[in-house]
Every structure is written in structure tokens, then in C-alpha cells.
Amino acid sequence: MISTHQPLVSIIIPCYKAEKELPQALESISQQIYTHWELVAVNDGWPDGTQAIIENFRKNHPNNKITYIKHPENRGLGATRNTGIQNSRGELVAFLDHDDLWEPKHLNNSIAVFRNQPCDIFYSSVIAFDSQGKTKDWIWGPTKEDLSQFPNSIFERNFIQPSAVVISKTFLDRLGMMDTDPGVHFCEDHDFWIRAANIRGKFVHSSEVTVRYRNSNPNAATSKIPMMLKHDLAVQKKHLYSDCFSTSVKCTAIANNYRRLGNYFWESRHILSLFYLGQSIYWQPKNTKNLKQFLKGLIYWPSTYKKLRRA
């Protein structure tokens, strides 16, 4: 639990090609019910109007400390969040990507949790919206099964979106910074949560959706599926010998990511697809579904299989 009644919340916004969407994110901060916050905005080396937007925001919030930092070169999302963390003063740290939005109750809900129960990491579920602001019909967050099987479930898939997270600075001091290895660049947040589970961090989920995730940004990692899957595999293998997760869960999760890669390349690069399906069998040899798909791929190449189905 937090030690003060009105803790300072440090809001970390990593910015890259941000000038179009950033004003909306800042407006969602302005609308927060909880007002004891500071902002640390970090530009990851892109020459645009981000600084001017932050300066204007500072003028409109004279009672809040607002810091702007610019990297001299692009360092990646993990390093950008790390710079923000290192320049924060708050008892709590909240992440908000420059193209996402908070509902007015987001910080207030998190403070209520930290006041009333043991908590290291607070997070809510997230709803997606497109570039026109239209809400999509899917929610990013844990299922009831994910919550009941935690922490094994967080190894299997990343159901925590960074913009939904508020984390204790004391716990951050134990956890350390985000991994900046290029090999996990698209999944450094998944690695962060797995590491937090490894040191027995207390996660608290709110089912109330208080974050809106923009799912239309061409720079978003979700548009780079193969690279994401490869980086997620690197994260999972990095923690292969952790005693926090069961062996069966770790092997199944790795096999599933190899199967997804195999499915992705099934038609465009079939030999590579078979390699990945073979890897999925190696990690989960008792999964007959993976074996059947691998054998089907050996016998019927996609073009031949389509012709046979049409016959």
C-alpha cells in the first residue's frame, strides 16, 4: 500500500512521430479526476512539433511539473520509457503511450487500489478504437481463466497493455528498467511483466475499462506480427529456467508461438512454415494438432491443396 494519502503520480509518455495524436493523449490527462501528477514526455529522436505541444500543455497546467526530454537519436520504446522513469519523482509511475487515451477515472481508480490493498502493479482492461475514434468490438485484458491461473497465464500471453499500468516506484526500484535488447524490442513490456512475476510482484486487475488503445497507428507493433512473435519467443526463452512458471506452461507457450509463425508463413514461405511447425512439435511433442498440420504441409503444398479442395 502507498505511504501517503495524495501520492504524486509520474506519468511517462514515450513519443515518436507523435505530433498528430499526442494532443488527444494530453487532453485525457487534463480530464483526470485525480490531479496530483507530474508529466515526463520523452521524444525518441524524431524532429517534429512534439516539444511545442508539450510547452503549450505546460502553460495550461502551471501547478503540475512537466518535463520534456529528447533523445539525440532513436533508442527504442523500452529505452524511452526508461528515460522517463529515471527522470520521475512520483511514488507511483503511470505509463501512457502518445496515441492512447485515459478515461477520467483511470488514475483515481488506481489510487483507490493502492490505498486499500497490497499492490505493486495496477492495470485495467483496455478497449481498442480506430483512427476515426470509432470503438472496436474487442477488449485487451485478462480472462477469468487468466486471472485464476496467474502467474502462469502471463507467461503464455501478454494481456497487460502498458497504457493501463500504474506501478509502485518502490517496486520499480526492485524490478529495474525495461530490457533494451533489440531482440525483444517489440515485446519489452511482456518481458517486464514476466520479470515482475518472477520477483513475486503483486498484480491487481480492474475489470473496469479506463483506457482506450489506438489500433490504427502504422507504427504500432501489432502490424508487425512475425517480428512480434519472434521477439516474444526470445522473451519466453529468456525466462525458460524461471521457477515461477510450470515447465508445461513454458513449453506450451513457446510451441504456440512457433505454430503461429508456421501459420503466418503457410502460403507465402512454405518451407519456412514447415520449419516453424517442426519447432512447435519439438516443444510440444504430444500435441497431435501440430503434428497433423506439419504432415499435411509435407504432403500438400498450399497451391496444390487449394486445387484439390476445389476439385
Image (cartoon, helix red, strand yellow):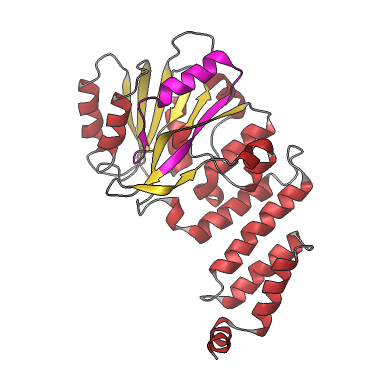
The percent position of residue 41, horizontal first and vertical second, equals 34, 31
Asked whether, in this view, residue 228 is left or right of residue 57, the answer is right
The vertical placement of 24 against 132, above or below, is above
**Does the image show residue 147?**
yes
The percent position of residue 171, horizontal first and vertical second, equals 59, 23
Question: Picture quarter containing residue 126?
Answer: top left
Quarter of the picture containing the C terminus is: bottom right
Q: In the image, is residue 111 part of the stretch drawn in magenta? A: yes
The vertical placement of 255 against 83, above or below, is below
The percent position of residue 18, horizontal first and vertical second, equals 30, 42
Asked whether, in this view, residue 50 is left or right of residue 253, the answer is left
The vertical placement of 303 against 201, above or below, is below
Instruction: Please state the total of marks drawn on the protein image.
Output: 0
Residue at the far bottom: name it: 311
Asked whether, in this view, residue 284 is left or right of residue 17, the answer is right
**Does the image show residue 1?**
no
Asked whether, in this view, residue 21 is left or right of residue 227, the answer is left
The percent position of residue 262, horizontal first and vertical second, equals 60, 68
Q: In the image, is residue 137 part of the stretch drawn in magenta? A: no
Q: Residue drawn at (40%, 26%), measured in percent from left and top?
A: 11
Quarter of the picture containing the N terminus is: top right
Question: Picture quarter containing residue 308?
Answer: bottom right
Q: Looking at this view, is 257 or 137 the one in front?
A: 137
Q: Which residues are magenta?
A: 98-127
Question: Picture quarter containing residue 284?
Answer: bottom right
